[in-house]
Image (cartoon, helix red, strand yellow):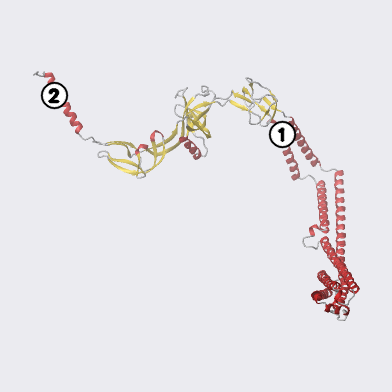
Amino acid sequence: MKILSKRNIVIFAILIVIFIFGAWKLSRPTPTQITTAKVERGKLVQSIEPSGTIKTKSEINLNFDATGRIAAINVKVGDIVKSGQMLAKLDTKNLDSNVMQAAADLEKAKGNLAAYEAGSTLETIAQYEADVQKAEANLLKAQVDLANLKAGLAQTYKNAYENQITVLQGALAPMETAMTDMDSVLGIENTSSNDTFDKAITTLDNSSFYYSQAKVDFQTARTKINDSKTSTNNLIAQSSYSDIENASTKTKIALDATATSLNSSWTVLDKLDTLNSSHNLSAATVTAKKTTLDTDKAAITTKKTATLAGEQSITSAKLNYGQESGASGSSQVAQYEASVKIYEAALAGAQATLAIKKAPPREVDLQSYKATISAAEASVASANANRGKAIIYAPVDGVITKKNNEVGETTSAATPVLIMIDNTDFQNEVEVNISEADISKIRNIIASNNGKPQSAKVVLDALGTEQSFYAEIVEIDPAQTVISDVVYYRAKLKIMGKYKNDGSVDMILTKENLQAVKPGMTASVTIYTDERDNVLMIPERAVIVKDGKKIARVLIDKKTNKIEEKEVVTGLRGNEGMIEIISGLNEGEEVVTFIKNGT
């Protein structure tokens, strides 16, 4: 058996000691490790960092503000142009005419003012006095015509009623004659007057119905005739118009009743004529009586026609005289009265005009003439402006880079005819794409700042971090832009100044400040979306959610690692993982950010 050397024994012993120490070390319990951070008060900043590129402002689209045919293009691609130089124009013949017309109207307005200030001549005043006299004569004639018309219509109105009295009273006799003739057949009022027909009627049973009806109609006619007599016999020229109209109505009723009775009586005779073999009356006797009744019917019809004609005359007289309800507007009187009013207005107008012509110039009228001149001047300016819309001038010094049209072509206001580069400007616009997750921050901060532009810091990769520029957001495209299936929103920033070494901003921006800035350069942009001054803040990882509440664990005793949980209200999420504490913690407290449990 080989005996170990002394050196090996020592090494072996050392290894055993190390092993025993390690085993002892590993077997000891490891204490819990707690990482904390203090609740600090300060400025909390929130920002986003999109990338972007420098865009040129120098390319200018030049287009007409009107539609028309191009008459001239005075430049070609590559030409250097000066500000105010005319580059192109449309056909301006009509516009030139409008300018000339507006200028002529202006001169006319000035002439009218001068004439008014000079006052009216004696000849002019004499002419207006003659106009007044003519208007007076026209009015007088219209008034006389109206008076004569009213008198004539009044007489016609009166005559219509008086004539109707004559017609009504003249209708009584034919009705009585008819009644007598019918009674000679029927024997109702004078029983002996129909002896000739009585026996024949009573022997004919099949005519008794017609005889009974004839008697009823006869009695009705008698009643209506008596009503008519009562109303008509007392009528005189001085009777009221309503009494005359009432009598006319009753007379029409009586005439209609008489006509009905005549028809019934005639029917009885006709039946006797048909059955002449049953009685001893001769056909000649019956025929003669039928002829008499036909004559009566014709007389009654004539009187009915006359009565209706009289009523129509009354109605026409009412309309013309303006007595019919609602008819005054269409009556002759209304027409003549309207003529009088027209001539009264004409006279008043002529008198007012004469007074104006005789009166000295009034300040209010002078102002009116001056206002007309101002309006004419505005029209001249407008005509010139419209003509200017048909001409393209160079807005700045620059170079023509593209020509899209030729002379003779038609163009619209939406189409650029020429494109030029502004060689007086410098590159100071940055275009960035902001993710949909961050765009709401930009919009919200703009809204909360009442439209104040949002600031940003721009660092150009080509120039290094030593130079940084102050910029503001000036435009956000509302339409989305999809890049690699990710939604972005394009925003435009304008470089407004340059950061100094001390962090302040030099807002005096010159071409020399940006002479190294070129279109297409990549820009690293920091947009400050929100900031809070003098707020409490802690690392966001120190806030946990427990039972639906936000909790911060505060270290109470470092020796015993005693922790107290406090509910907190958080606010703005800032940069570097910090978050605002609105309530629940005090400045200086230590909050737990990480706990590593021992073994």
Quarter of the image holding residue 503? top left
Q: Quadrant of the C terminus?
A: top left
Q: Badge 2 local density, few (<14 within 10 Å), some, or many (20+)? A: few
Apparent side of residue 497 relative to residue 135 in the rendered image (left or right): left
SS label for mark 2: helix
Which quadrant, please, contains the N terminus?
A: top left
- Tell me the quarter of the picture where residue 583 sits: top left
Can you see residue 312? yes
Above or below residue 579? Residue 506 is: above
Label 1 Cα neighbours within 10 Å, binned few <14 / some 14-19 / many ≥20: many
Farthest bottom residue in view = 192
Q: Where 563 sits versus 156, above or below?
A: above
Q: Is residue 33 left or right of residue 464?
A: left
- Give the CA distance from mark 1 to mark 2: 113 Å
**Labels in figure, total:** 2
Q: Residue 419's x, y, as percent?
A: 62, 25
Residue at left offset 86%, top offset 48%: 131
Q: Which residue is mark 2?
A: 13
Quarter of the figure with residue 109: top right
Label 1 is placed on what type of residue? Ala
Tell me if 271 is positioned left or right of 530 in this view: right
Amino acid on which disc 2 is placed: Ala
Mark 1 and 2 residues: CB-CB less than 8 Å, in contact?
no
Q: Which residue is mark 1?
A: 383
Up-down: is 317 above or below 29? below
**Residue 524 appears at what percent x and percent y?**
46, 27
Q: Can you tell which mark lies on residue 266? A: none
Q: Nearer the viewer, residue 57 or 90?
A: 90
| Residue at the farthest front position | 277
Going from N to C along the chain, the mark reached first, 1 or 2, is: 2
